Image: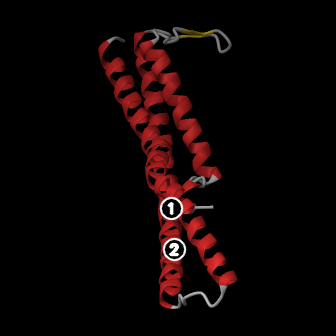
Amino acid sequence: MSVTLVDPLSEVSRKERRMLLGLSMLSLFFTHGGALPTKFTALGVELGTGEQRTFLFIIAVGLLYFLSAFFLYSMSDFIVWRKKMTEEYIKESRGMIQSYMYDNSPQNQYDAEVQFEEEKAWRKYQIWSRLTKPMSLLRAIFEFMLPIIVAIYSIANVLTHAYSET
């Protein structure tokens, strides 16, 4: 299986990503959905305008923390992922070079049939292989960039909301 198509994130990065996206969605729910709490009945706390602003700042700090953690962990995973892809590419290139260098013409009918089947399999592999780069790019955007973009938008939205409406 191609390294470009395996999961690029470690379990730690995946947990940080999940927390980052969850808190981002919660913050967007509070700000865009008009669901900013005014009372925590379980704690017996009512939030006035100043407390709501503080509540939003705490959410922004949480978002910054999870964004930083995800960025650090995911960049480490991204480097490992790219390194594995490079190693796979070098290994495949060496194999292709060696097969071209030592490729002998078939000695008999059996060798000719085997060579024909290998070439046929290689052509099929090439068709699917062409899809790995675009899929790898889409996966990198989805796994690495999308959570960062959503978090940055959420942080900006929370801070804007804290300063404007409360």
Q: How is the image coloured?
A: secondary structure
How many numbered marks have been drawn onto this rendered protein structure? 2
Residue 48, position as x, y percentages in the image: 45, 9
Q: Which mark is residue 87?
A: 2
Task: Give SS at disc 1.
Answer: helix
Disc 2 from disc 1: Cα separation: 19 Å
Say which residue appears at 55% left-offset and 88% top-offset. Answer: 105
Left or right of 133, for residue 19: right
Q: Give neighbour class at mark 2: few <14, some 14-19, many 20+ (Cα, 10 Å).
A: few
Circle 2/circle 1 CB separation < 8 Å: no
127 and 91: which one is in front? Answer: 127
- Residue at 60%, 55% (x, y): give it: 6
Q: Residue furthest front?
A: 109
- Residue that appears at 68% across and 13% down: 42
Which of these two is toward me, 28 or 98?
98
Q: Is residue 143 above or below residue 122?
A: above
Question: Can you tell which mark lies on residue 126?
Answer: 1
Q: Amino acid at mark 1?
A: Gln
The front one of 89 and 139 is 89
The answer to whether residue 68 is visible is no
Q: Quadrant of residue 104?
A: bottom right
Amino acid identity at mark 2? Glu
User: Which secondary structure, mark 2?
Assistant: helix
Residue 7 numbered mark, or none: none
Please state if 77 lies on the left or on the right of 146 as rendered: right
Corner quadrant of residue 153: top left
Label 1 CA crowd tier, 10 Å (few <14, some 14–19, many 20+): few
- Quadrant holding the N terminus: bottom right
In this rendering, the answer to whether 117 lies above or below 6 is below
Q: Is residue 67 left or right of residue 161?
A: right
